[in-house]
Amino acid sequence: MSRRHAARPTFALTALAALALVACGTEKSGAESPQDKSADAAGVRSGAAFTDMMRKVARSCPDSTSSERPPTGPARTVPSGPAETSPSDTPKTPPTDAIEPALPTAGPEVELNARDWCASALHEERITQALWDLADPTPAKVRTILHDLGYIDERIHDLRRSGTTTRFSLDLRDRGGQLCLDGTAAGEKTVVDKCGAPSGT
């Protein structure tokens, strides 16, 4: 057998081995990396935690399918006037006097069901309380506080500085509801109001 014929099988085997290595590399590169899997798992956990928080906040509210109209009584507690202080100089806290808001007759809030209306008061109160003592409400600090309360980045929108305050909005649509919140973090002048958004899941 000539050297030329003897070299052909060797060349063929080398080519097949190279193709196998390329195919193996392609298969590995197409697989999901451990980092990707970890990020996906973290996203699922944060989404589940947000849903759990939403359920807990609104646990005393009527079901979203209820035909009950939003209440006309006190719907939320908001700061009004100077903060109260105790003789021992304890930290300032928002007053707890409830106000009775007028039932809206126009605008997106009219579309809120009884559950949304009820839940909005609870979300407004807990967010206002958390932001009340924030002396310098930067977007980063406001985001951190919202995270601590259980609100996730996917639901936090329009977070921006405006003078000495930070504005933000929250998408709180749940179970087909339309609840959203518009907020202005300004220390003792913090305001959080309900709004209506297109129906969500």
Image (cartoon, helix red, strand yellow):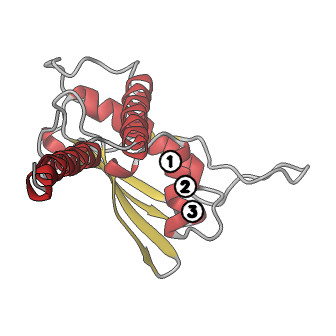
Give the residue pinned by disc 2. 144
The reply to whether callout 3 and callout 1 are in contact (CB within 8 Å) is: no
**Label 3 vs label 1: CA separation?**
10 Å
Residue at 54% x, 70% y: name it. 138
**Label 2 vs label 1: CA separation?**
5 Å
Residue 113, position as x, y percentages in the image:
19, 30
The reply to whether callout 3 and callout 2 are in contact (CB within 8 Å) is: yes
Residue 117, position as x, y percentages in the image:
28, 34
Q: Residue furthest right?
A: 88
Can residue 75 be spotted in the picture?
Answer: no
What label does residue 147 carry, if any?
1
Identify the element where label 3 is drawn. helix
How many numbered discs? 3
- Name the residue nearer the viewer: 53 or 46: 46
**Label 3 vs label 2: CA separation?**
5 Å
Residue 43 image-quadrant placement: top left
Give the residue pinned by disc 3. 141
Tell me the kind of residue under disc 3.
Lys
The reply to whether callout 2 and callout 1 are in contact (CB within 8 Å) is: yes
Can residue 67 be spotted in the picture?
Answer: yes
Identify the element where label 2 is drawn. helix
